Amino acid sequence: MVRKAPGEPVGDAVDGIASDVLSSTRRYSLGTGEAEILAILAILRILRIRSLLLPLLAVLLTLSACSLLPSDAPRDEPAPERDNLRVGVGNAIDTAPLRVAVENGMFRQAGLRVDLVEIEGGDEGIDRLASAELDITFASDVALFRAAAAGTSLQLQGEAYTAGENTMALVALPDSGHTSLEDLSWPRVAVDKIGGLGTLTAGSVLETAGFDLDSVGFEEWAMPRMIDALQQGDVDVAWLVEPYITLAEKDFGARVLADCSRGATQDFPMSAYAASGEFAQANPRTLSVFRDVLGRAQQHGADPMVIREALPRFADIDPTTASLVSLGTYPTSLNGVRLQRVADLMHSSGLLADRLDVQSLLPKPELS
């Protein structure tokens, strides 16, 4: 240890101490913070100037805090408000990535238990959000926007499915004599819901083809019964989605008269997931985790083979039909501009009295 010689300036002694400490640091592999602490303690012992004790101690604490604690140490983030979610699901093709993610434990790895609840349609899911039977529901974008426009408080949690070529179509049976839309004069069209996605997209295609929509008769039929309605002559054409299009073609020789993913409805957003506004406000961190995992699940669903192999496990779809169905795309994040297309077409077609701002239904950016 260096000691201050009589008459030696204090500054020189301090320099000597610093030199000795650096040598010790190399010899004993001391860390930078530890070396600085030893230097300050040595100075205190040699100088023995009590009036300097407090200032030097302050320096010691500052240096040790800066040197020994990393400045970019992660901060503990608040935990999600809950560890389980009840999610309503419908059409197996639209919801396939979510189902696969639950099956593969992706949500469980993120700390969430997701219980899937089968629902008959989007309206049922939205009603069960209101009664707190579900935390999140799948529904068509049309159903969600219609409910929001009617005053239901909703927050979108992710897009489910976007239409691709022949994923929704106007279909006729071979013995009907209809081979194109031009063969129809006063068409009777089967749709799954009056004022729903079928009405909107079929109406757009028919109007583009030159039909006056006042001459079109939309009739509500359950999708599995539409072939019966065609066979019995109750309707002329049916608006079908997959896998019903492929089943109708394969089992009944049906022909597609018009692809409903064309023109104004090309690459059209079809469905999404939503929570009630109240639930979203109370559980922002939980829903943020859900959106994150859903986004990764949707990305996984970009591989068609993932979807085709999964469909027979989730619905009454045989492997042959699963290999033939037309598939759309699975958006990995919410896009307000893309979704606004649906709301604007609903407004221009008269399904919404006023224009709906879809951006108001999206999560706040800091929680997205």
Image (cartoon, helix red, strand yellow):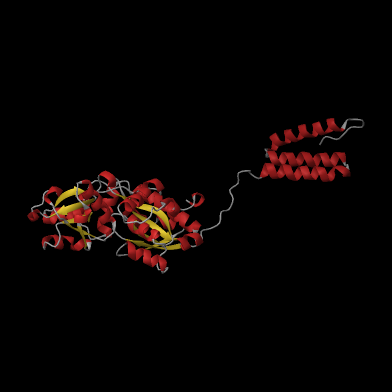
- Residue depicted at 45% across the width and 59% down the height: 112
Q: Is residue 142 visible?
A: yes
80 over 368 or under it: above or below: below
Location of residue 237 (image quadrant): bottom left
Q: Is residue 110 visible?
A: no
Quadrant into which the N terminus falls: top right
**What is the x, y in percent for residue 264?**
28, 45
- Residue depicted at 13% across the width and 56% down the height: 251
128 over 329 or under it: above or below: below
**What is the x, y in percent for residue 281?**
50, 60
Between residue 1 and residue 63, name the one nearer to us: 63
**What is the x, y in percent for residue 129?**
40, 65
**What is the x, y in percent for residue 315?**
25, 60
Location of residue 58 (image quadrant): top right
Between residue 213 and residue 239, name the one nearer to us: 213
Left or right placement of residue 338 versus residue 179 in this view: right
- Number of dots carrying numbers: 0
Location of residue 350 (image quadrant): bottom left
Left or right placement of residue 111 versus residue 101 in this view: right
Furthest residue toward right: 7
